[in-house]
Amino acid sequence: MTNLRERLTSTDLSPTPSERKVIRALLDNYPRSGLGPMAKLAEHAGVSDPTIVRLVKKLGFSGYAEMQDVLLSEMDHRLRSPVTLLQPKAHGAQDDAWNSYLDDSCRALRDTLALTQPEDVRVLVDLILDTRHSLYCFGGRLSSFLAHYLVSHLRLLRPGCHALEDNAQLPDRLFDLQRQDVVLLFDYRRYQTQALRVANAAKARGARVVLFTDIYASPLREVADLVISAPVESISAFDTLVPALAQVEALIATLTLRSADLEDRLEGIDTLRASFAAHLLEEKQ
């Protein structure tokens, strides 16, 4: 029998949008999120208690208490696993910080995969590929490179993609947002006040907000229409954005496969680039 985490991310589950919020809350801090009172989980997910009850039934449990029993059983099994018991010793025995960090990054990527809801990916891809609406990307102090990296690729895939810069022109750009435009926001702990201002301004203009963040209680979660989570813990003194970058590249790969007439678009862009890069002296020869 598959474990509960696998059942939560199964494509056979077909959760409603409200149920996906509960799944996201459960996966973000699995299994701890599901071990507390149902009311606390409902508050964290931003849904009502009946929504959780419906999801629990859909997962095949008679009630919330039975689901918690399964979570406790899984946690107990994991704590008793020889692999889990050996992990701290393995890290402590390694003197090579370089290799240790790369090994820990592999662990973080596996955790990221476990957080993924297929329906969230589908919704995200559909939002981005809808060329009727413009796309805007914004990042925090340390995550702005993710926003710029993504928008650079999005401009190759479709028109109407913009980078929001944290400068004096930011309010002017936000004023141009139209209803149903999409703002892709990157913000990880420690959360940026400016990112929250951008999210609130976007919602006030009727735009939709997709938040790329960590698994913790970002204040932007309350205003986001869709949340894509990634772990940030590492064995370094600093948080890691390796999983977040992997999510961005996975998104680009998915969009590339889904983009219609991409070859013609790229050929046209390359032709224009070549004409702008041409040397005047060579043209006269």
Image (cartoon, grey):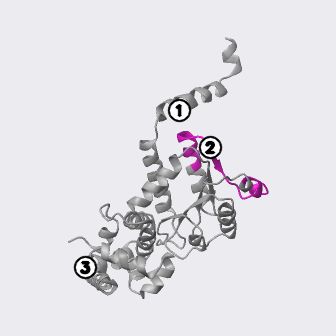
> Which residue corresponds to mark 2?
160
Q: Which label belongs to residue 82?
A: 3
Please say if the residues under marks 2 and 3 sit with CB atoms less than 8 Å apart: no
Magenta includes 155?
Answer: yes
What is the distance, in whole Å, between disc 2 and disc 3 at their CAs?
52 Å
Write the residue at 55% across / 50% down: 150
Residue 250: x %, y % from top left: 44, 52
Q: Which label belongs to residue 265?
A: 1
Magenta includes 171?
Answer: yes
What is the distance, in whole Å, between disc 1 and disc 3 at their CAs?
53 Å
Q: Where 46 falls versus 120 (above or below)? A: below
Q: Is residue 8 left or right of residue 162?
A: left
Q: Amino acid at mark 1?
A: Arg
Write the residue at 39% across / 76% down: 30
Q: Amino acid at mark 3?
A: Pro
- Who is closer to the viewer here, 100 or 80? 80
